[in-house]
């Protein structure tokens, strides 16, 4: 006999947690069913050890892309709408899945569903690989008996999120290419061009101007040891790929971007789009306000908004309306959103209002991105021109001195 901790929905859609001693998970499912509870997740003390091994420990460097998840949800919704069972749907989708890592996960989920688990419970073990809204929407669909509708809404949400990410990536591609190209040009000039010229100047006894000496010192530092240069390059790549995803890295990156004039407006608008769309979809799927806000706080990926939403949840538990709770944070939530939520609470059309707001702010994100790139491009071009111009001057000045020396 093992002790199992469970989470389950009651008839009034509230989450209940508890501990039950049983010989298997199926016994816990039977126990909860007798109590008219809908299982959400069940785990024993042994589960943590199992999770350390198996698929996840082998596939350390494997991943599931947002596109994989988006197409999986869309196809699962289509097959269930067509009248296929979850087992039949998963079996079909597993055969069509090309990502080997994702295929193994789906096969594991299929076995658990065949064993009597709900699909949301089966995915629970892998929740860190999926968006925060993923498990929540599936749970809500199971509780409401409208899994196909919940999956369709989740598919639409993931498509919108994918479009948003693509907009950001597309807008930032050219500035990044420009920055990398200018850095490479300047570095090559400092490593290969300047040292050879300054050597000839020194041979002819030409006194180097201050600007030339500064760039020469930088050049000497770069050419001192290519091994050290390699370590520095790896450290920079590590900083922008791994460190930025850590808790400290996220805080540092967020602090810098949130204090940059145009970028901070963009970050705020992106957070508002994600909040409104996630909250709206979850409310519409049948989840409670508190559960919907909890998942929304996790999906925003913005520290300020997460803290504000967590405080809002406490206010709502104490009986305060959503609009009055978020109105305490006027710097984060615009008056328009607060007014719209207030109207939605009175009319019962909160989901539609939130989705409409998210679509409206999508256009605002577009405009802010265009504004940001229109500012970045001339700034980067000017910076690149000034750097190359400064190096050119540092080379030309000694040449004049050299010519004057012979004249």
Image: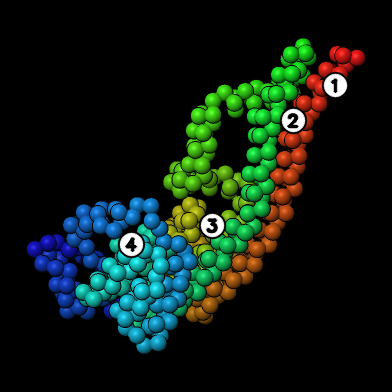
Among the two numbered marks 3 and 1 on one chain, the one whose residue lies closer to the N terminus: 3
Q: Quadrant of residue 21?
A: bottom left
| Residue 101 seen anywhere in this rendered image of the structure | yes
- Give x and y (percent) for residue 381: 74, 45
- Residue 370's disc is none
Q: Is residue 99 left or right of residue 224?
A: left
Query: Which residue in the protein does label 2 denote?
Result: 391
Is label 2 in contact with label 4 (beta carbons under 8 Å)? no
| Residue 132 seen anywhere in this rendered image of the structure | no
Gap in Å between the C-alphas at discs 3 and 4? Answer: 34 Å
Among the two numbered marks 2 and 4 on one chain, the one whose residue lies closer to the N terminus: 4
Q: Secondary structure at mark 2?
A: helix
- Give x and y (percent) for residue 287: 39, 73
Among the two numbered marks 4 and 1 on one chain, the one whose residue lies closer to the N terminus: 4
- Give x and y (percent) for residue 351: 50, 76
Picture quarter with the C terminus: top right
Q: Residue at x 40, y 58 (%)?
A: 63
Among the two numbered marks 3 and 2 on one chain, the one whose residue lies closer to the N terminus: 3
Q: Is residue 373 left or right of residue 108?
A: right
Gap in Å between the C-alphas at discs 4 and 1? Answer: 68 Å
Query: Would you call the spot at circle 4 few (<14 residues within 10 Å), some (14-19), or many (20 or more)?
Result: some
Q: Secondary structure at mark 1?
A: helix
Query: Which residue in the protein does label 1 denote?
Result: 400
Q: Nearer the viewer, mark 3 or mark 2?
A: 2
Among the two numbered marks 1 and 2 on one chain, the one whose residue lies closer to the N terminus: 2
Query: Which residue in the protein does label 4 denote?
Result: 126
Gap in Å between the C-alphas at discs 2 and 4? Answer: 53 Å
């Amino acid at each position: 006999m093992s002790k199992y901790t469970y989470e389950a929905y009651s008839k009034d859609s509230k989450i209940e947690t508890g501990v039950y001693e049983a010989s298997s998970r199926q016994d816990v499912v039977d126990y909860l069913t007798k109590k008219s509870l809908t299982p959400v997740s069940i785990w024993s003390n042994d589960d943590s050890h199992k999770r350390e091994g198996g698929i996840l420990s082998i596939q350390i460097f494997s991943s599931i892309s947002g596109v994989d998840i988006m197409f999986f949800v869309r196809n699962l919704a289509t097959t269930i709408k067509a009248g296929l069972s979850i087992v039949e749907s998963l079996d079909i989708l597993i055969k069509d899945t090309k990502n080997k890592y994702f295929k193994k996960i789906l096969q594991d989920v299929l076995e658990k569903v065949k064993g009597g688990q709900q699909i949301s419970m089966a995915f629970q073990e892998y929740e860190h690989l999926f968006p925060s809204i993923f498990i929540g929407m599936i749970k809500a669909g199971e509780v409401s008996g409208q899994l196909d509708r919940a999956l369709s809404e989740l598919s639409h949400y993931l498509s919108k999120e994918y479009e948003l990410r693509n907009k950001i990536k597309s807008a930032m591609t050219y500035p990044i290419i420009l920055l990398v190209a200018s850095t490479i040009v300047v570095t090559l000039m400092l490593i290969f061009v300047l040292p050879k010229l300054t050597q000839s100047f020194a041979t002819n006894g030409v006194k180097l101007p201050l600007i030339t000496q500064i760039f020469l010192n930088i050049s000497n530092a770069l050419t001192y040891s290519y091994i050290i240069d390699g370590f520095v390059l790896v450290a920079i790549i590590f900083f922008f790929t791994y460190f930025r995803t850590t808790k400290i890295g996220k805080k540092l990156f967020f602090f810098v971007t949130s204090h940059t004039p145009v970028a901070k407006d963009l970050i705020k608008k992106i957070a508002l789009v994600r909040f409104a769309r996630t909250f709206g979809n979850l409310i519409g799927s049948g989840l409670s306000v508190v559960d919907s806000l909890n998942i929304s706080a996790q999906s925003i990926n913005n520290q300020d908004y997460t803290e504000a939403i967590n405080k809002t949840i406490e206010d709502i538990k104490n009986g305060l309306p959503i609009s009055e709770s978020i109105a305490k944070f006027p710097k984060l939530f615009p008056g328009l959103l607060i007014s719209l939520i207030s109207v939605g609470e009175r009319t019962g059309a909160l989901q539609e209002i939130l989705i409409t707001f998210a679509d409206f702010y999508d256009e605002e994100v577009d405009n802010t991105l265009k504004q940001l790139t229109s500012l970045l491009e001339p700034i980067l071009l000017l910076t690149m021109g000034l750097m190359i111009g400064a190096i050119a001057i540092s080379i030309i000045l000694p040449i004049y001195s050299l010519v004057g020396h012979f004249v």
